[in-house]
Image (cartoon, helix red, strand yellow):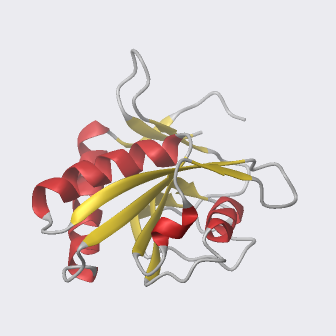
Amino acid sequence: MSEKKLLILNSQQIQQKIDRIAYQVLEDNFDEEELLIAGILPRGNHVAERLKTVLDDIAPFKTRLLVIELQKQSSSLQAKINFDIEECANKVVVLVDDVLNSGKTLAYGFGVFLDVPLKKLRTVVLVDRNHKSFPVTTDYAGMALSTVIKEHVSVVLDQEGEEDAVYLM
């Protein structure tokens, strides 16, 4: 991986992207009573927390944050969740991650909800890299970024001593 870091989004731009996504989620779910926002650890959860904060300010519905921890290197779905999966039945779930690269993480995220009848499942990513190996698309993306496979997108959120940023490396 290259030592060079190219700033793609600064802290203010990240917040603007999250604000815009929140309004899109609001438009898509205006008539709902409750929205479940499922953040994939670690950085997807930070994006989910920020999305929830904005939605709590602008939306008439109640939001609840769910946390999903995936074993991303596993060849099968292995997930830990902080909620009873049955509580998601007949509700809208918004699955959130920081970067969509191959689609494997979001595919595993979908797997958590496969046995539950959801009203709808939507996906949010801060950066969509367009390198999908899995048939996964995002419903809401902060930005689409065409990169080469060897490049890496690094999302820095809520890290001690560092300003929020998205870098291409």
Quarter of the image for residue 103 reads bottom right
Q: Quadrant of the C terminus?
A: top right
- In the rendered image, residue 157, in percent from the top left (x then y), is placed at 42, 34
Q: What residue is shown at x 23% (from left), y 48% (from top)?
A: 53
In the figure, 124 relative to 83: above or below? below
Q: Position of residue 10 (x, y in %)?
A: 32, 39
Within the image, what quadrant is residue 99 found in?
bottom right
Image quarter in which the N terminus is found: top right
Residue at 29% over, 37% down: 11
Q: Is residue 93 above or below residue 99?
A: below
User: How many circles with numbers are drawn on the protein?
Assistant: 0
- Can you give x and y, in whole percent of width and height, for residue 98 in the image? 50, 51
Tell whether 52 sits left or right of 84: left
Name, please, the residue furthest toward the right: 75
> Residue 129 or 43: which is nearer the viewer?
43
Residue 123 shows in this picture: no
Q: Is residue 137 visible?
A: yes
Nearer-the-camera pick, 55 or 18: 55
Residue at left offset 69%, top offset 64%: 108
Q: Position of residue 78 (x, y in %)?
A: 77, 54
